[in-house]
Image: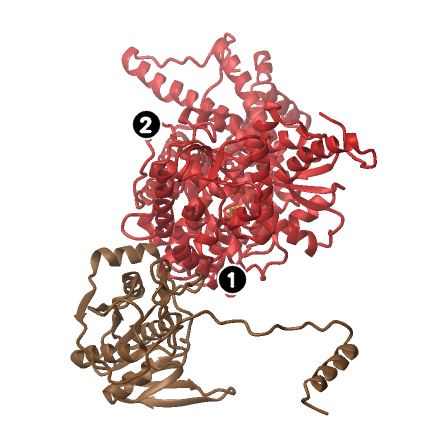
């Protein structure tokens, strides 16, 4: 012992010579220089983009979508980072392990900072001003410091060990880096995987060596009793003693191992801006900058040209987002395009863009880099961004289902990026011929079917009551049908059913007849911004010629754009989806409805559920009618897209392994339900096909939620008849 | 959109004639006059074969440089068609104004276009759709060729530049193709382009509307001389009805034989 009285402390440098100290400070300095150089280069890269517009950074609130999602604020996002709300979602154990590492390392970082504060700042100040170096690293402070930060260390150790274990042994598809779009020229992603291993294994090694030297120090100082508070270090010290390392030997090993630990820690800091470790900084930043409105309300194109064509078209936030990706693969796992074999994985998209940006700004990562021949994919800095760097087919494969944005733990918004790139494809005139003719039809006729707009309301003819023309008469609800519910032969019957329900319920409603045009949700998402604006102008003109209080829509796609995007063009009326209105009718209880006892499952349409958070209204209708609702494994915010969105319904899908709707139908078929309930005309069309192509005909029937509702309404009427006619047998004839 | 590559000798000046037609998705009605369709309530769209001709012209320009000029009569919604041609890459658009409203007979259209072509003078090729809904027998290109004394080829499926001439592929029916090389001025009736007509993004059309102007050319008095006159237009009247024959093939065959006998076609 070199201290006479027992003071609870230790030397900060464990007996290193002053030469060694000098070397340490030099290395630390070099490390910091490398770290900041790397960081500044990254920040410069972000500044190569354009400024964020329409996002008040200081206010921190995304306005205009209050009814859809909680308006996010910086405070909230920070809280999400600190609690790992997004990382623990749907993957609790991985999230928990990450949370341990996160807080553990924050603790260890604080511990080191406190030491530096005491030794380098407090110590030096007191030496200069009082002539004698002082330290607060003694007594109760020392003891509690060790206790608290030993806990942090143990947390980090446990977390890092679990993450390492997962990375080596887990078979989760998310950890598989195989591309969805396999370039002909070939590619290798071994380096990426190596980089990840180095990162997690490096963290583990730093903690383990930290504990080893702590144990050596305690062993070397003959286990003072106050060090028992340094419980982990003490335990490790005991371990050293058990393997025969006495106090002297411990001191010798310590001086070597200390250097190893320090060198690894410094190397890690220097490595950070050039590796996956960068996400420690970029991901929380992106979380704070994320803007949940931007997928629901697509951002405008850069001013100079349509869509993203060059580096400076990306916003700062886009570029930070690209660096925030941790390759966690969650978006890759949920993407319907990727699932059915389309050459699109949202993760690959982000990684390709990131590598392309890094290439273009000469800002390379050390390992996070895919090996590809020069000039291919992200290594093609001269080619077209949309078309060469990211292939056309990749971009057209997206259904804009938003599953990726929903699950990305670091708040990356893939869909706006995809649409910006599609805009540039549309501007080049590059698209599927079928999409082109749909867009042309919409431009000339106002509907994708290419039918005369005067045919739009032909479906009302066979109703035995007139449907009000909202341009001539005031109505409470203006019913906006959308193209499919107006023109598709199979779907107009459902429109008639809804009309009958509305009329029987005594609701004042009307339609726009030939003045209604395609609402433009999917036109916009296909990247045809000019046409979208034209459609908005047309519909806004029609709205102003009509007199109504609220809008109800059949199509969740129209619903999304009318509710979230039209307000920017002056629409002030509230917009509802018919499933909400049905729920309202049910709760008002004015209609008497027969109870049904069907076994059903319900499919959440992307644009109703994920986009607009309407999960409960349709469920309330289904269970309110007495049906037994069995949920599919993927439901609510994890619903699996039918494959029709984002303009995909107008494009060729013959190259897919299976259609997303077929994948979904197979999921439903495992439940043993008789009915597959939908609340979207496009879903009805997609899933009635899928029932046939998956061989489930006769086993499962697709019904629209309003058909169920109507059946209960008519059941009542039939029951009325039945009272006077005992021959009529009502199966589910129990009255509510 | 694309950088224009002007090469001495290679560059071609191509004129594309476009027509507006009543959109056939609409239900057409006969006007009160009885000699025309009711033009007040129908939408007018560009003739699809003319769009193919425009596409072919743009492809030629992209290959060898030069200029594409689109020309049309002042017909309903023609501006839309001309601006979208500019949005696709045409350099100039010309509208012949002062033509009497209503349907323009193909002979008159040919004369009007020829007048402009004569006054313009320095073009290399005139491309237009091989036919149109109001010119099903495809006379326009032929008439213009004859009027101007310029060689004419119809049912052209490819017109590829070769030096300062065009290599022309025609479909002769029965799967036969013919190739020829046109040096000097030529008039072509285009059946289909080498690729489907490109898409004109609405933003580009709107851009074209704000940045370019459509030139006008006054229609001149034209004496067509004697010719046929439309006396009446009417929807085809259904004559007789089809009878569906049920049964298996043998039965159906027997019924057919019986029918033919009954009509006295065979004995
Ligand atoms: S929006 Fe859907 S289809 Fe598009 S990339 Fe994301 S998950 Fe895939
Ligand atoms: S984009 Fe998000 S969800 Fe996808 S791999 Fe990157 S971090 Fe994970």
Label 2 residue SS:
loop
Question: Residue pushed farthest top?
Answer: A5
The 10 Å Cα crowd at callout 2, few under 14, some 14 to 19, many 20 or more, is few
| Disc number placed over residue A143 in the picture, else none | none
Nearer to us in this view, A92 or A208? A92
**Residue plotted at (73% across, 26% down):** A735
Residue under label 1, please give it. Answer: A183
In the picture shown, does residue A164 fall above or below B169?
above
Relative side of B138 to A450, left or right: left
- Asked if ligand 2 lies within 8 A of label 2, the reply is no
Question: Residue pushed farthest right?
Answer: A727
User: Which of the 4 quarters of the picture holds residue A703?
Assistant: top right
**Residue plotted at (68% across, 38% down):** A601
State the image coordinates of residue A468 (x, y, percent, origin top left): 47, 39
| Disc number placed over residue A58 in the picture, else none | 2
Relative side of A533 to A602, left or right: left
Q: Which chain is brown?
A: B
User: Which of the 4 quarters of the picture holds residue B145?
Assistant: bottom left
**Residue plotted at (64% across, 54% down):** A689
**Location of the C terminus of chain A (image quadrant):** top right
């Amino acid at each position: 012992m070199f201290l006479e009285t027992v003071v609870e402390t230790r030397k900060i440098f464990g007996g290193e010579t002053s030469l060694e100290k000098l070397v340490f400070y030099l290395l630390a300095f070099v490390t910091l220089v490398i770290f900041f150089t790397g960081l500044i280069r990254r920040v410069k890269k972000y500044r190569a983009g354009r400024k964020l517009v329409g996002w008040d950074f200081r206010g921190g609130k995304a306005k205009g979508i209050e009814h859809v999602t909680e308006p996010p604020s910086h405070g909230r996002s920070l809280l999400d980072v600190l609690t790992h709300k997004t990382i623990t979602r749907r993957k609790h154990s991985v999230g928990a392990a990450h949370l341990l590492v996160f807080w553990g390392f924050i603790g260890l970082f604080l511990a080191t900072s406190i030491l530096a504060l005491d030794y380098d700042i407090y110590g030096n100040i007191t030496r200069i001003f009082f002539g004698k170096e002082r330290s607060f690293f003694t007594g109760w402070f020392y003891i509690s410091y060790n206790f608290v930060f030993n806990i942090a260390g143990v947390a980090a150790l446990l977390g890092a060990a679990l993450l390492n274990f997962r990375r080596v042994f887990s078979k989760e598809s998310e950890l598989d880096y195989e591309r969805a779009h396999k370039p002909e020229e070939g590619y290798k992603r071994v380096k990426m995987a190596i980089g990840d291993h180095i990162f997690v294994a490096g963290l583990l090694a730093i903690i383990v060596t930290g504990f080893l030297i702590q144990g050596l120090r305690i062993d070397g100082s003959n286990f003072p009793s106050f060090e028992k508070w340094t419980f982990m270090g003490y335990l490790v010290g005991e371990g050293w003693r058990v393997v025969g390392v006495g106090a002297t030997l411990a001191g010798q090993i310590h001086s070597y191992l200390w250097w190893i630990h320090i060198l690894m820690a410094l190397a890690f800091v220097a490595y950070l801006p050039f590796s996956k470790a960068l996400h420690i900084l970029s991901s929380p930043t992106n979380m704070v900058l994320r803007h949940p409105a931007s997928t629901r309300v697509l951002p405008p194109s850069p001013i100079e040209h349509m869509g993203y064509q060059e580096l400076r078209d990306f916003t700062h936030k886009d570029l930070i987002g690209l660096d925030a990706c941790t390759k966690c693969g969650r978006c890759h796992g949920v993407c319907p395009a990727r699932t059915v074999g389309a050459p699109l994985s949202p993760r690959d998209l982000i990684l390709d863009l990131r590598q392309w940006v890094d290439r273009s700004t000469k800002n390379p990562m050390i390992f996070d880099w895919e090996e590809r021949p020069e000039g291919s994919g992200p290594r093609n800095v001269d080619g077209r961004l949309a078309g060469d760097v990211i292939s056309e087919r990749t971009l057209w494969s997206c259904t804009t289902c938003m599953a990726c944005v929903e699950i990305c733990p670091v708040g990356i918004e893939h869909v706006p990026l995809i649409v910006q790139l599609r805009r540039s494809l549309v501007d080049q005139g590059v698209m599927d011929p079928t999409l082109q003719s749909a867009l042309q039809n919409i431009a000339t006729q106002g509907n994708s079917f290419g039918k005369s707009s005067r045919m739009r309301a032909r479906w009302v003819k066979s109703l035995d009551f007139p449907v009000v023309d909202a341009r001539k008469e005031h109505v409470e609800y203006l019913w906006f049908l959308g193209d499919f519910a107006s023109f598709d032969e199979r779907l107009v019957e459902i429109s008639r059913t809804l009309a009958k329900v509305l009329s029987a319920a005594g609701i004042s409603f009307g339609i726009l007849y030939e003045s209604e045009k395609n609402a433009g949700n999917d036109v916009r998402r296909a990247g045809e911004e000019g046409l979208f604006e034209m459609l908005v102008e047309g519909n806004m003109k029609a709205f102003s010629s009509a007199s109504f209080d609220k809008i109800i829509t059949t199509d969740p796609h129209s619903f999304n754009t009318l509710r979230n995007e039209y307000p920017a063009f002056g629409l002030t009326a509230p917009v509802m989806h018919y499933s909400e209105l049905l729920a309202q009718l049910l709760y008002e209880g004015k209609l008497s409805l027969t109870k049904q006892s069907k076994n059903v499952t319900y499919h959440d349409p992307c644009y109703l559920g994920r986009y607009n958070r309407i999960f409960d209204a349709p469920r309330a209708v289904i269970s309110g009618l007495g049906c037994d609702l069995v949920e599919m494994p993927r439901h609510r915010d994890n619903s699996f897209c039918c494959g029709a969105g984002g303009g995909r319904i107008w494009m060729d899908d013959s190259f897919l392994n299976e259609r997303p709707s077929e994948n979904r139908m197979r999921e439903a078929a495992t439940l043993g339900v008789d009915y597959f309930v939908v609340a979207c005309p496009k879903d009805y069309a997609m899933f009635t096909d899928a029932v046939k192509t998956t061989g489930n005909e006769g086993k499962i029937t697709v019904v629209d939620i309003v058909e169920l509702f109507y059946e209960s309404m008519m059941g009542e009427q039939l029951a009325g008849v039945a009272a006077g006619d005992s021959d009529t047998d009502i199966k589910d004839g129990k009255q509510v | 959109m694309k950088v224009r590559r002007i090469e001495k000798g290679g560059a071609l000046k191509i004129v594309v004639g476009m027509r507006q037609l009543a959109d056939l998705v609409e239900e057409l009605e006969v006007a009160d006059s009885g000699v025309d369709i009711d033009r007040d309530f129908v939408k007018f769209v560009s003739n699809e074969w003319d769009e193919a001709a425009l596409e072919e012209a743009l492809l030629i320009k992209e290959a060898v440089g030069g200029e594409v000029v689109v020309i049309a009569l002042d017909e309903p919604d023609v501006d839309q068609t001309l601006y979208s041609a500019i949005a696709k890459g045409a350099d100039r658009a010309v509208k012949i104004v002062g033509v009497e409203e209503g349907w323009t007979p193909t002979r008159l259209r040919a004369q009007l276009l020829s007048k402009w072509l004569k006054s313009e003078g320095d073009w290399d090729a005139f491309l237009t759709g091989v036919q149109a809904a109001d010119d099903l027998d495809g006379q326009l290109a032929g008439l213009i060729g004859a009027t101007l004394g310029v060689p004419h080829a119809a049912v052209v499926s490819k017109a590829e530049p070769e030096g300062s001439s065009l290599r022309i592929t025609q479909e002769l029916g029965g799967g036969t193709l013919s190739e020829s090389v046109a040096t000097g001025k030529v008039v072509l009736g285009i059946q289909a382009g080498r690729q489907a007509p490109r898409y004109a993004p609405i933003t580009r059309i709107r851009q074209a509307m704000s940045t370019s102007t459509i030139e006008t050319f006054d229609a001149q008095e034209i004496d067509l001389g004697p010719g046929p006159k439309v006396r009446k237009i009417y929807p085809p009247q259904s004559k007789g009805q089809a009878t569906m024959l049920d049964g298996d093939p043998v039965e159906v065959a027997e019924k057919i034989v019986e029918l033919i006998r009954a009509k006295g076609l065979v004995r």
